[in-house]
Amino acid sequence: MGKPIEQWKCEINLLNKLVSLYEVFWKNPNHTSVEEAMSGCFLTIEDVKEAEARLHRFRSYIQHVFPETRGQNGMIESPLVEISRMKQAVEQFYGLDIPGRFFLKLDSHLPISGSIKARGGIYEVLKHAEELAVKHRLLSLEDDYSKLDSESFRKFFSQFSIAVGSTGNLGLSIGIISAKLGFQVTVHMSQDAKQWKKDLLRKHGVTVVEYQEDYSKAVEEGRKQALQDPTCYFIDDENSRHLFLGYAVAALRLQKQLENMNIKIDEDHPLFVYLPCGVGGGPGGVAFGLKMIYEDNVHCFFAEPTHSPCMLLGLVTGLHDQVSVQDFGIDNKTIADGLAVGRPSRFVGKLMEPLLSGSYTVSDEQLYRLLSMMIDEENIHLEPSALAGVYGPVSLIRKGQDYIHQQKLKDKIKNATHIMWATGGSMVPRDIIRQDYKKGKELLINWQ
Ligand SMILES: *Cc1c(COP(=O)(O)O)cnc(C)c1O
Protein backbone atom coordinates (compact mmCIF):
# COMPACT_ATOMS: atom_id res chain seq x y z
CA MET A 1 0.00 0.00 0.00
CA GLY A 2 3.04 2.25 0.04
CA LYS A 3 2.27 3.98 3.32
CA PRO A 4 0.49 3.31 6.63
CA ILE A 5 -3.32 3.40 6.77
CA GLU A 6 -3.23 6.36 9.16
CA GLN A 7 -1.33 8.42 6.64
CA TRP A 8 -3.77 7.47 3.87
CA LYS A 9 -6.64 8.54 6.10
CA CYS A 10 -5.00 11.89 6.82
CA GLU A 11 -4.42 12.58 3.15
CA ILE A 12 -7.81 11.47 1.89
CA ASN A 13 -10.65 12.36 4.20
CA LEU A 14 -13.14 10.11 2.41
CA LEU A 15 -11.19 7.08 3.64
CA ASN A 16 -12.18 7.86 7.24
CA LYS A 17 -15.81 7.60 6.28
CA LEU A 18 -15.28 4.42 4.27
CA VAL A 19 -13.48 2.77 7.17
CA SER A 20 -16.27 3.86 9.53
CA LEU A 21 -18.76 2.22 7.12
CA TYR A 22 -20.66 5.46 6.55
CA GLU A 23 -22.62 5.85 3.35
CA VAL A 24 -20.65 8.13 1.04
CA PHE A 25 -21.07 9.85 -2.31
CA TRP A 26 -17.87 10.42 -4.27
CA LYS A 27 -17.50 12.76 -7.22
CA ASN A 28 -14.72 11.48 -9.46
CA PRO A 29 -12.05 14.19 -9.82
CA ASN A 30 -10.55 12.43 -12.86
CA HIS A 31 -13.81 12.43 -14.80
CA THR A 32 -13.32 14.14 -18.15
CA SER A 33 -14.97 14.46 -21.55
CA VAL A 34 -15.39 11.29 -23.59
CA GLU A 35 -13.35 12.79 -26.38
CA GLU A 36 -10.39 13.28 -24.09
CA ALA A 37 -10.84 9.97 -22.29
CA MET A 38 -10.96 7.92 -25.48
CA SER A 39 -7.79 9.31 -26.98
CA GLY A 40 -5.72 6.90 -24.93
CA CYS A 41 -8.13 3.97 -24.85
CA PHE A 42 -7.44 0.58 -26.41
CA LEU A 43 -11.10 -0.42 -26.74
CA THR A 44 -13.60 1.26 -29.06
CA ILE A 45 -17.22 1.04 -30.09
CA GLU A 46 -16.06 -1.23 -32.93
CA ASP A 47 -15.03 -3.85 -30.38
CA VAL A 48 -18.48 -3.64 -28.83
CA LYS A 49 -20.12 -4.04 -32.23
CA GLU A 50 -17.98 -7.07 -32.98
CA ALA A 51 -19.20 -8.67 -29.76
CA GLU A 52 -22.78 -7.88 -30.72
CA ALA A 53 -22.27 -9.51 -34.13
CA ARG A 54 -20.93 -12.65 -32.46
CA LEU A 55 -23.98 -12.87 -30.20
CA HIS A 56 -26.08 -12.44 -33.32
CA ARG A 57 -24.41 -15.46 -34.97
CA PHE A 58 -25.27 -17.58 -31.94
CA ARG A 59 -28.96 -16.66 -31.91
CA SER A 60 -30.17 -19.76 -33.74
CA TYR A 61 -28.24 -21.98 -31.32
CA ILE A 62 -29.45 -20.10 -28.25
CA GLN A 63 -33.10 -20.32 -29.18
CA HIS A 64 -32.66 -23.99 -29.95
CA VAL A 65 -31.31 -24.91 -26.56
CA PHE A 66 -33.01 -22.24 -24.41
CA PRO A 67 -36.64 -22.14 -25.58
CA GLU A 68 -37.38 -19.21 -23.24
CA THR A 69 -35.37 -17.01 -25.65
CA ARG A 70 -37.56 -17.86 -28.69
CA GLY A 71 -39.78 -14.84 -28.20
CA GLN A 72 -36.70 -12.70 -28.80
CA ASN A 73 -35.22 -14.87 -31.56
CA GLY A 74 -32.38 -16.09 -29.38
CA MET A 75 -31.35 -12.67 -28.14
CA ILE A 76 -30.55 -12.66 -24.43
CA GLU A 77 -32.03 -9.31 -23.43
CA SER A 78 -34.06 -7.79 -20.60
CA PRO A 79 -36.94 -5.30 -20.44
CA LEU A 80 -36.65 -1.65 -19.47
CA VAL A 81 -39.62 -0.57 -17.35
CA GLU A 82 -40.74 2.70 -15.81
CA ILE A 83 -41.26 2.52 -12.05
CA SER A 84 -43.30 5.59 -11.13
CA ARG A 85 -44.89 4.09 -8.04
CA MET A 86 -41.47 3.15 -6.71
CA LYS A 87 -40.27 6.69 -7.44
CA GLN A 88 -43.09 8.14 -5.36
CA ALA A 89 -42.45 5.72 -2.52
CA VAL A 90 -38.72 6.49 -2.50
CA GLU A 91 -39.36 10.24 -2.51
CA GLN A 92 -41.82 9.93 0.30
CA PHE A 93 -39.73 7.60 2.41
CA TYR A 94 -36.51 9.59 2.09
CA GLY A 95 -38.28 12.97 2.17
CA LEU A 96 -36.86 14.10 -1.18
CA ASP A 97 -38.06 15.59 -4.40
CA ILE A 98 -36.17 13.84 -7.20
CA PRO A 99 -36.50 15.46 -10.65
CA GLY A 100 -36.82 13.17 -13.68
CA ARG A 101 -38.30 9.74 -14.41
CA PHE A 102 -37.28 6.38 -12.89
CA PHE A 103 -36.63 3.29 -14.98
CA LEU A 104 -35.46 -0.17 -14.03
CA LYS A 105 -33.33 -2.27 -16.38
CA LEU A 106 -34.42 -5.79 -15.54
CA ASP A 107 -31.26 -7.85 -15.96
CA SER A 108 -32.70 -9.70 -12.99
CA HIS A 109 -35.00 -11.26 -15.57
CA LEU A 110 -32.44 -12.06 -18.27
CA PRO A 111 -33.05 -15.55 -19.68
CA ILE A 112 -30.81 -18.52 -18.82
CA SER A 113 -29.28 -17.31 -15.55
CA GLY A 114 -31.31 -14.39 -14.19
CA SER A 115 -28.53 -11.86 -13.68
CA ILE A 116 -26.28 -9.41 -15.51
CA LYS A 117 -23.76 -12.29 -15.77
CA ALA A 118 -25.92 -13.74 -18.54
CA ARG A 119 -24.30 -11.01 -20.65
CA GLY A 120 -20.53 -11.21 -20.10
CA GLY A 121 -20.27 -14.78 -18.84
CA ILE A 122 -22.25 -16.38 -21.62
CA TYR A 123 -20.60 -14.19 -24.24
CA GLU A 124 -17.09 -15.29 -23.31
CA VAL A 125 -17.99 -18.99 -23.35
CA LEU A 126 -19.62 -18.60 -26.77
CA LYS A 127 -16.57 -16.78 -28.07
CA HIS A 128 -14.30 -19.57 -26.84
CA ALA A 129 -16.56 -22.24 -28.35
CA GLU A 130 -16.63 -20.45 -31.69
CA GLU A 131 -12.86 -20.14 -31.78
CA LEU A 132 -12.32 -23.82 -31.00
CA ALA A 133 -14.87 -24.99 -33.55
CA VAL A 134 -13.55 -22.69 -36.28
CA LYS A 135 -9.95 -23.65 -35.57
CA HIS A 136 -10.82 -27.34 -35.94
CA ARG A 137 -12.71 -26.58 -39.15
CA LEU A 138 -16.03 -27.74 -37.77
CA LEU A 139 -17.72 -24.37 -38.11
CA SER A 140 -17.56 -21.29 -40.27
CA LEU A 141 -18.93 -17.88 -39.40
CA GLU A 142 -21.63 -18.09 -42.08
CA ASP A 143 -23.09 -21.36 -40.76
CA ASP A 144 -26.38 -21.80 -38.99
CA TYR A 145 -25.07 -22.19 -35.45
CA SER A 146 -27.98 -24.37 -34.37
CA LYS A 147 -25.79 -27.23 -35.62
CA LEU A 148 -23.80 -26.84 -32.39
CA ASP A 149 -26.74 -28.51 -30.67
CA SER A 150 -25.69 -32.02 -31.59
CA GLU A 151 -23.99 -35.07 -30.09
CA SER A 152 -20.95 -34.67 -32.32
CA PHE A 153 -20.34 -31.08 -31.16
CA ARG A 154 -20.93 -31.95 -27.52
CA LYS A 155 -18.41 -34.76 -27.89
CA PHE A 156 -15.95 -32.35 -29.47
CA PHE A 157 -16.32 -29.74 -26.71
CA SER A 158 -16.08 -32.41 -24.00
CA GLN A 159 -12.34 -32.68 -24.72
CA PHE A 160 -11.98 -29.17 -23.34
CA SER A 161 -12.67 -27.67 -19.96
CA ILE A 162 -13.63 -24.28 -18.61
CA ALA A 163 -12.99 -22.89 -15.12
CA VAL A 164 -14.10 -19.76 -13.28
CA GLY A 165 -14.03 -18.27 -9.77
CA SER A 166 -17.22 -16.64 -8.56
CA THR A 167 -19.40 -15.40 -5.71
CA GLY A 168 -22.26 -17.20 -7.42
CA ASN A 169 -23.90 -15.54 -10.41
CA LEU A 170 -20.95 -15.68 -12.79
CA GLY A 171 -20.58 -19.35 -11.92
CA LEU A 172 -24.25 -19.89 -12.72
CA SER A 173 -24.01 -18.27 -16.15
CA ILE A 174 -20.78 -19.91 -17.18
CA GLY A 175 -21.70 -23.25 -15.66
CA ILE A 176 -25.04 -23.47 -17.42
CA ILE A 177 -23.90 -22.42 -20.90
CA SER A 178 -20.66 -24.42 -20.77
CA ALA A 179 -22.45 -27.59 -19.68
CA LYS A 180 -25.04 -27.06 -22.41
CA LEU A 181 -22.33 -26.89 -25.09
CA GLY A 182 -20.69 -30.03 -23.71
CA PHE A 183 -17.62 -28.59 -21.96
CA GLN A 184 -16.24 -29.98 -18.71
CA VAL A 185 -16.77 -27.09 -16.34
CA THR A 186 -15.52 -26.28 -12.85
CA VAL A 187 -16.79 -23.36 -10.78
CA HIS A 188 -14.70 -22.21 -7.80
CA MET A 189 -17.11 -20.69 -5.30
CA SER A 190 -16.35 -18.28 -2.47
CA GLN A 191 -17.87 -18.76 0.95
CA ASP A 192 -20.52 -16.05 0.26
CA ALA A 193 -22.01 -18.13 -2.53
CA LYS A 194 -25.55 -19.17 -1.72
CA GLN A 195 -26.33 -22.87 -1.28
CA TRP A 196 -29.12 -22.84 -3.87
CA LYS A 197 -26.69 -21.61 -6.54
CA LYS A 198 -24.29 -24.49 -5.80
CA ASP A 199 -27.15 -27.00 -5.83
CA LEU A 200 -28.48 -25.71 -9.14
CA LEU A 201 -25.05 -25.92 -10.78
CA ARG A 202 -24.47 -29.47 -9.59
CA LYS A 203 -27.84 -30.39 -11.05
CA HIS A 204 -26.56 -29.13 -14.41
CA GLY A 205 -23.53 -31.41 -14.15
CA VAL A 206 -21.07 -28.70 -13.15
CA THR A 207 -18.20 -29.43 -10.74
CA VAL A 208 -18.42 -27.00 -7.82
CA VAL A 209 -15.38 -26.44 -5.59
CA GLU A 210 -16.11 -24.58 -2.37
CA TYR A 211 -13.75 -22.30 -0.43
CA GLN A 212 -13.93 -20.97 3.09
CA GLU A 213 -12.43 -17.70 1.89
CA ASP A 214 -13.78 -14.84 -0.18
CA TYR A 215 -14.04 -14.22 -3.90
CA SER A 216 -10.39 -13.29 -4.52
CA LYS A 217 -9.26 -16.65 -3.13
CA ALA A 218 -11.74 -18.58 -5.27
CA VAL A 219 -10.45 -16.79 -8.38
CA GLU A 220 -6.80 -17.34 -7.44
CA GLU A 221 -7.28 -21.07 -6.85
CA GLY A 222 -9.28 -21.44 -10.04
CA ARG A 223 -6.57 -19.69 -12.02
CA LYS A 224 -3.88 -21.88 -10.48
CA GLN A 225 -5.64 -25.16 -11.20
CA ALA A 226 -6.53 -24.12 -14.75
CA LEU A 227 -2.88 -23.29 -15.50
CA GLN A 228 -1.91 -26.91 -14.86
CA ASP A 229 -4.26 -28.14 -17.57
CA PRO A 230 -3.53 -27.10 -21.17
CA THR A 231 -7.07 -27.99 -22.32
CA CYS A 232 -8.58 -25.72 -19.68
CA TYR A 233 -9.76 -22.21 -20.45
CA PHE A 234 -9.93 -19.92 -17.43
CA ILE A 235 -12.46 -17.12 -17.44
CA ASP A 236 -10.74 -14.33 -15.60
CA ASP A 237 -13.38 -12.10 -14.02
CA GLU A 238 -10.65 -9.70 -12.85
CA ASN A 239 -8.97 -9.12 -16.21
CA SER A 240 -11.07 -10.31 -19.11
CA ARG A 241 -11.77 -7.89 -21.94
CA HIS A 242 -14.14 -10.44 -23.49
CA LEU A 243 -16.38 -10.49 -20.45
CA PHE A 244 -16.22 -6.71 -20.46
CA LEU A 245 -17.27 -6.45 -24.12
CA GLY A 246 -20.09 -8.94 -23.58
CA TYR A 247 -21.47 -6.62 -20.91
CA ALA A 248 -20.93 -3.56 -23.10
CA VAL A 249 -23.30 -4.89 -25.78
CA ALA A 250 -26.10 -3.98 -23.34
CA ALA A 251 -25.59 -0.33 -24.30
CA LEU A 252 -26.44 -0.89 -27.97
CA ARG A 253 -29.57 -2.77 -26.94
CA LEU A 254 -30.60 -0.12 -24.42
CA GLN A 255 -30.23 2.58 -27.05
CA LYS A 256 -32.85 0.79 -29.18
CA GLN A 257 -35.16 0.36 -26.21
CA LEU A 258 -34.98 4.06 -25.34
CA GLU A 259 -35.69 4.99 -28.95
CA ASN A 260 -38.67 2.65 -29.07
CA MET A 261 -40.03 4.22 -25.90
CA ASN A 262 -39.53 7.72 -27.33
CA ILE A 263 -37.16 8.68 -24.57
CA LYS A 264 -34.84 11.38 -25.72
CA ILE A 265 -31.25 11.57 -24.53
CA ASP A 266 -29.33 14.68 -25.56
CA GLU A 267 -27.65 17.73 -24.12
CA ASP A 268 -30.88 18.96 -22.55
CA HIS A 269 -32.14 15.50 -21.55
CA PRO A 270 -29.45 13.86 -19.44
CA LEU A 271 -29.29 10.15 -18.70
CA PHE A 272 -28.21 8.97 -15.25
CA VAL A 273 -27.28 5.31 -14.82
CA TYR A 274 -26.68 3.60 -11.49
CA LEU A 275 -24.76 0.33 -11.60
CA PRO A 276 -24.13 -2.13 -8.75
CA CYS A 277 -20.41 -2.91 -8.71
CA GLY A 278 -18.47 -5.95 -7.53
CA VAL A 279 -15.15 -6.58 -9.22
CA GLY A 280 -16.16 -4.05 -11.89
CA GLY A 281 -16.55 -5.89 -15.19
CA GLY A 282 -20.35 -5.84 -15.39
CA PRO A 283 -20.96 -2.21 -14.47
CA GLY A 284 -17.76 -1.11 -16.21
CA GLY A 285 -18.71 -2.80 -19.47
CA VAL A 286 -22.22 -1.36 -19.47
CA ALA A 287 -20.98 2.13 -18.58
CA PHE A 288 -18.25 1.97 -21.22
CA GLY A 289 -20.76 1.06 -23.93
CA LEU A 290 -23.10 3.84 -22.83
CA LYS A 291 -20.32 6.44 -22.85
CA MET A 292 -19.43 5.44 -26.42
CA ILE A 293 -23.03 6.06 -27.48
CA TYR A 294 -24.25 9.00 -25.39
CA GLU A 295 -20.86 10.52 -24.61
CA ASP A 296 -21.12 13.42 -22.17
CA ASN A 297 -24.92 13.22 -21.96
CA VAL A 298 -24.79 10.06 -19.87
CA HIS A 299 -23.67 10.14 -16.25
CA CYS A 300 -22.61 6.76 -14.85
CA PHE A 301 -22.34 5.95 -11.16
CA PHE A 302 -21.14 2.77 -9.47
CA ALA A 303 -22.90 1.48 -6.36
CA GLU A 304 -21.16 -0.59 -3.68
CA PRO A 305 -22.08 -1.92 -0.21
CA THR A 306 -20.60 0.00 2.72
CA HIS A 307 -18.86 -3.27 3.73
CA SER A 308 -17.34 -3.95 0.25
CA PRO A 309 -16.37 -0.63 -1.37
CA CYS A 310 -13.45 -2.16 -3.29
CA MET A 311 -13.70 -0.24 -6.58
CA LEU A 312 -14.11 3.08 -4.78
CA LEU A 313 -11.10 2.31 -2.58
CA GLY A 314 -9.05 1.41 -5.65
CA LEU A 315 -10.06 4.61 -7.43
CA VAL A 316 -9.54 7.10 -4.59
CA THR A 317 -6.16 5.68 -3.64
CA GLY A 318 -5.15 5.04 -7.26
CA LEU A 319 -3.97 1.62 -6.10
CA HIS A 320 -6.68 -0.41 -7.91
CA ASP A 321 -5.93 -4.13 -7.41
CA GLN A 322 -3.01 -3.36 -5.12
CA VAL A 323 -5.41 -2.66 -2.28
CA SER A 324 -8.25 -4.62 -0.69
CA VAL A 325 -11.00 -3.49 1.65
CA GLN A 326 -9.54 -5.87 4.23
CA ASP A 327 -6.26 -3.89 4.12
CA PHE A 328 -8.30 -1.01 5.50
CA GLY A 329 -9.99 -3.14 8.13
CA ILE A 330 -13.29 -3.41 6.25
CA ASP A 331 -14.79 -6.90 6.53
CA ASN A 332 -16.33 -7.50 3.04
CA LYS A 333 -19.41 -9.02 4.68
CA THR A 334 -22.65 -7.98 3.05
CA ILE A 335 -26.08 -9.37 2.22
CA ALA A 336 -25.38 -8.30 -1.37
CA ASP A 337 -23.50 -11.48 -2.29
CA GLY A 338 -23.06 -10.39 -5.93
CA LEU A 339 -21.08 -7.39 -4.71
CA ALA A 340 -19.06 -9.09 -1.96
CA VAL A 341 -15.70 -8.43 -3.57
CA GLY A 342 -12.73 -7.12 -1.58
CA ARG A 343 -10.31 -6.33 -4.38
CA PRO A 344 -11.28 -4.56 -7.63
CA SER A 345 -10.22 -5.17 -11.21
CA ARG A 346 -7.29 -2.96 -12.22
CA PHE A 347 -8.22 -3.28 -15.88
CA VAL A 348 -11.71 -1.89 -15.23
CA GLY A 349 -10.57 0.74 -12.73
CA LYS A 350 -8.01 2.19 -15.13
CA LEU A 351 -10.41 2.14 -18.07
CA MET A 352 -13.23 3.77 -16.10
CA GLU A 353 -11.07 6.36 -14.32
CA PRO A 354 -11.78 9.18 -16.82
CA LEU A 355 -15.32 8.03 -17.76
CA LEU A 356 -17.02 7.45 -14.42
CA SER A 357 -19.00 10.35 -12.92
CA GLY A 358 -18.75 9.00 -9.40
CA SER A 359 -19.53 6.30 -6.92
CA TYR A 360 -21.53 5.82 -3.76
CA THR A 361 -21.93 3.29 -0.98
CA VAL A 362 -25.12 1.92 0.49
CA SER A 363 -25.81 0.01 3.70
CA ASP A 364 -27.35 -3.46 3.83
CA GLU A 365 -30.31 -1.98 5.74
CA GLN A 366 -31.17 0.29 2.80
CA LEU A 367 -30.91 -2.65 0.41
CA TYR A 368 -33.41 -4.65 2.48
CA ARG A 369 -35.80 -1.69 2.68
CA LEU A 370 -35.67 -1.04 -1.05
CA LEU A 371 -36.12 -4.76 -1.75
CA SER A 372 -39.42 -4.76 0.17
CA MET A 373 -40.52 -1.45 -1.30
CA MET A 374 -39.92 -2.75 -4.83
CA ILE A 375 -42.17 -5.75 -4.14
CA ASP A 376 -44.90 -3.64 -2.55
CA GLU A 377 -44.91 -0.91 -5.19
CA GLU A 378 -44.02 -2.70 -8.42
CA ASN A 379 -44.29 -6.41 -7.61
CA ILE A 380 -40.72 -6.88 -8.87
CA HIS A 381 -38.59 -9.40 -6.97
CA LEU A 382 -34.88 -8.58 -6.89
CA GLU A 383 -31.87 -9.92 -5.03
CA PRO A 384 -30.24 -7.52 -2.54
CA SER A 385 -27.30 -6.64 -4.83
CA ALA A 386 -29.72 -5.36 -7.47
CA LEU A 387 -31.15 -2.74 -5.12
CA ALA A 388 -27.82 -0.95 -4.77
CA GLY A 389 -28.55 0.91 -8.01
CA VAL A 390 -32.00 1.93 -6.84
CA TYR A 391 -30.44 3.99 -4.05
CA GLY A 392 -28.55 6.06 -6.64
CA PRO A 393 -30.92 9.00 -7.11
CA VAL A 394 -31.29 9.33 -3.32
CA SER A 395 -27.55 9.49 -2.90
CA LEU A 396 -27.11 11.88 -5.83
CA ILE A 397 -29.79 14.34 -4.73
CA ARG A 398 -28.73 14.28 -1.09
CA LYS A 399 -24.98 14.36 -1.51
CA GLY A 400 -24.18 14.99 -5.16
CA GLN A 401 -25.30 18.59 -5.58
CA ASP A 402 -21.69 19.54 -6.30
CA TYR A 403 -21.71 17.23 -9.28
CA ILE A 404 -25.02 18.58 -10.59
CA HIS A 405 -23.73 22.11 -10.26
CA GLN A 406 -20.35 21.43 -11.83
CA GLN A 407 -21.90 19.64 -14.82
CA LYS A 408 -24.39 22.51 -15.27
CA LEU A 409 -27.32 20.13 -14.83
CA LYS A 410 -29.38 22.27 -12.46
CA ASP A 411 -31.93 23.33 -15.07
CA LYS A 412 -31.76 20.12 -17.08
CA ILE A 413 -32.23 17.55 -14.36
CA LYS A 414 -36.00 17.96 -14.54
CA ASN A 415 -35.72 16.26 -17.96
CA ALA A 416 -33.55 13.48 -16.58
CA THR A 417 -33.96 9.76 -17.19
CA HIS A 418 -32.68 7.74 -14.24
CA ILE A 419 -31.93 4.11 -15.05
CA MET A 420 -31.24 1.78 -12.17
CA TRP A 421 -29.58 -1.42 -13.27
CA ALA A 422 -31.40 -4.29 -11.51
CA THR A 423 -28.60 -6.81 -11.80
CA GLY A 424 -30.19 -10.01 -10.53
CA GLY A 425 -33.00 -11.80 -8.78
CA SER A 426 -35.41 -13.88 -10.85
CA MET A 427 -33.71 -17.19 -10.03
CA VAL A 428 -33.68 -16.66 -6.26
CA PRO A 429 -35.94 -19.23 -4.53
CA ARG A 430 -39.17 -17.71 -3.27
CA ASP A 431 -38.65 -18.64 0.39
CA ILE A 432 -35.34 -16.74 0.42
CA ILE A 433 -36.96 -13.65 -1.10
CA ARG A 434 -39.73 -13.94 1.47
CA GLN A 435 -37.20 -13.84 4.32
CA ASP A 436 -35.47 -10.80 2.83
CA TYR A 437 -38.83 -9.13 2.26
CA LYS A 438 -39.81 -9.65 5.90
CA LYS A 439 -36.54 -8.19 7.10
CA GLY A 440 -37.00 -5.16 4.85
CA LYS A 441 -40.52 -4.59 6.12
CA GLU A 442 -39.29 -4.62 9.70
CA LEU A 443 -36.60 -2.10 8.83
CA LEU A 444 -39.13 0.12 7.05
CA ILE A 445 -41.31 0.20 10.13
CA ASN A 446 -38.43 0.77 12.56
CA TRP A 447 -36.96 3.63 10.60
CA GLN A 448 -36.41 6.57 12.93
C1 LIG B 1 -21.74 -9.77 -10.48
C2 LIG B 1 -22.87 -8.94 -10.05
C3 LIG B 1 -22.77 -7.54 -10.01
C4 LIG B 1 -21.51 -6.77 -10.31
O1 LIG B 1 -20.74 -7.17 -11.39
P1 LIG B 1 -19.14 -7.13 -11.30
O2 LIG B 1 -18.70 -7.50 -12.65
O3 LIG B 1 -18.72 -8.12 -10.25
O4 LIG B 1 -18.76 -5.76 -10.89
C5 LIG B 1 -23.88 -6.85 -9.60
N1 LIG B 1 -25.02 -7.46 -9.25
C6 LIG B 1 -25.17 -8.80 -9.30
C7 LIG B 1 -26.46 -9.41 -8.91
C8 LIG B 1 -24.10 -9.57 -9.70
O5 LIG B 1 -24.23 -10.91 -9.73
Image (cartoon, helix red, strand yellow):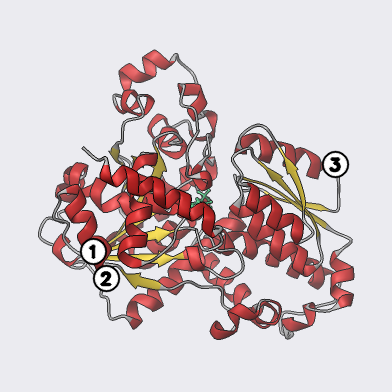
Callout 2: CB less than 8 Å from ligand 1: no
Mark count: 3
Q: Which residue is mark 2?
A: 265
Q: Of residues 97 and 265, which is closer to you in this image?
A: 97
Amino acid on which disc 1 is placed:
Pro
Q: Secondary structure at mark 2?
A: loop
Q: Of residues 436 and 316, which is closer to you in this image?
A: 436
Left or right of 362, for residue 148: right
Question: Is 158 located above or below residue 80 in the figure?
Answer: above
Q: Which residue is mark 3?
A: 228
Q: Secondary structure at mark 1?
A: loop
Are the residues at dot 1 and dot 2 in contact (C-beta closer than 8 Å)?
yes
**Separation (CA) of disc 3 from disc 2:** 49 Å
- The image position of residue 217, as x and y in percent, is 66, 34
Q: Which residue is mark 1?
A: 270
Tell me which residue sits at (26%, 71%) in the image. 265
Q: Secondary structure at mark 3?
A: loop
Q: Which mark is residue 210?
A: none
Left or right of 96, for residue 359: right
**Dot 3: few (<14), some (14–19), or many (≥20) neighbours within 10 Å?**
few
